[in-house]
Image (cartoon, rainbow, N blue to C red):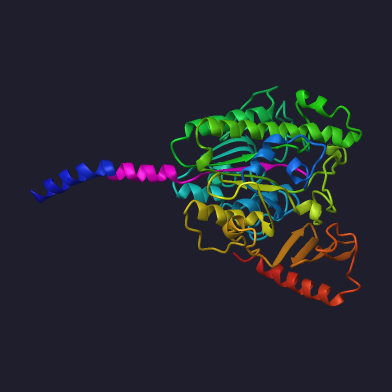
Amino acid sequence: MWSGVVIYVLGFICPFVCAAVDAAERTRPNVILMLADDLGSVDLNCYGSKDLITPNVDALADRGVRFTQFYVGSAICSPSRAALLTGRYPQRAQLPRNSEFDGMPSAQLTLAELFKEAGYRTGLVGKWHLGETPETDPLGQGFDEFFGHLRGCIDNYSHFFYWAGPNRHDLWRNRTRVFESSQYFPDLMVREAKRFLNENQTKPFFLHLTFNTPHYPLQPEQKFVGLYSDMEDTLRQRYAPFVTSLDDKVGQVIAELNRLGLRENTVLIFMSDHGYSTEERSFGGGGSSGPYRGAKATLWEGGIRVPCILSWPGRIPAGEVREQFVTSMDLFPTLAEYCEIDLPEHKLDGTSISSVIADVDADSPHGVWHWELYGKWAVRDGHWKLVTTKEETFLSHLSKDIGERDNLALQYPNVVARLTALHDAWVIESVQQ
């Protein structure tokens, strides 16, 4: 008899309990993490650019917090992305250089895996560049679905790998090669992002939207080229319309988010993976680091200090600026906190910056920070920054010399020695799991 009563009671209350659980799931914030590729440190109007047209990202800054000392984990693509997705230095994430076929080890816990385990639908649209094996491709690293390219860059119309031979078509839906020749890849990205939003609007989701722009090949839409016809700098004239193309795609995705009524319950982040490219395929330049020295592949400020905007309407401040020193690795624990997800037990190098986001006067969570790339290394402690290359050991005080022009190494040998010792210790510690 009692079993029948229990079954009756459970049958009566279960719909209400399940409905409550579903409602709680739906109120958990969605997350869209937008990543630009090779965008210069100041190449947005909201970051001081006077000659580029970026109304959509600027509008995002008006509805969120804009960081002025936001650092990525590396000055090139793969290690920067590995740091972002794991919350760990690239060295600890076991991908300190650009990805080969094997990529980042599958033992690393990614944001996608964190969200998936918490019941989120996870999707990646765009560039991956973290591995091509079943264990290291997007599906192997926690994404429920993937549309985009696995390698570092493609032609936006043929979708062939652009860097080197042999010729390889590199456009995928999950693990199936797909062919959409002559279709502009950034448009395909917007199409797929909209589809993902529509299909998952009733459940919490994590969408990693990894634009391949303004990375070479510089292939802007013709409708934006004319906006810069009077620009005297021919290098920047090639680059500028591609940035506006990127901005247009960002705007289209946000417009769809608004149309679906999801904007208020979505944490939206826009950032770059590192500074602008000066490579031959980018015609030697075109982007801008503004007052900062260096660009992509360097450990000067222009290589590792990037634009970043975080917006969550009604939950974090709007139209405010944060000057505290924060990093891309901080997003892992910050998003976990916002979405009420327990952090992994293993070591993270990032720290939640929710207090910084909430309060302009909050302290930075970081004192000492490190970078290492192809034999070059840098360490920052407060305003002191030491950069060491094969050619020189360069010490600067960023509060007085943001452009890293005046080498103080000979004047302050004790500071050089102290920062070197800190970095030597970090080299040993950073590979520990």
Q: Position of residue 239 (x, y in %)?
A: 82, 35
Along the line of sight, the residue nearer the viewer: 305 or 3 = 305
Q: Position of residue 25 (x, y in %)?
A: 41, 44
| Residues shaded magenta | 17-40
User: From this viewpoint, is residue 167 visible?
Assistant: no
Image quarter of residue 383: bottom right
Image quarter of residue 333: bottom right
293 relative to 249 in the view: left or right: right
Image quarter of residue 189: top right
Quarter the C terminus occupies = bottom right
**Residue at image location 76% in from the left, 38% down from the top:** 215
54 relative to 351 in the view: left or right: right
**Residue at image location 50% in from the left, 42% down from the top:** 265
303 relative to 348 in the view: left or right: right
- Residue 139 in magenta stretch: no
User: From this viewpoint, is residue 88 visible?
Assistant: yes
**Residue at image location 38% in from the left, 42% down from the top:** 23
- Residue 25 in magenta stretch: yes
Q: Position of residue 49 (x, y in %)?
A: 80, 42
Along the line of sight, the residue nearer the viewer: 338 or 38 = 338
Up/down of 344 relative to 136, above or below: below
Q: Position of residue 30 (x, y in %)?
A: 51, 43
- The outermost residue toward the bottom is 414
Up/down of 430 relative to 280, above or below: below
Along the line of sight, the residue nearer the viewer: 93 or 259 = 259
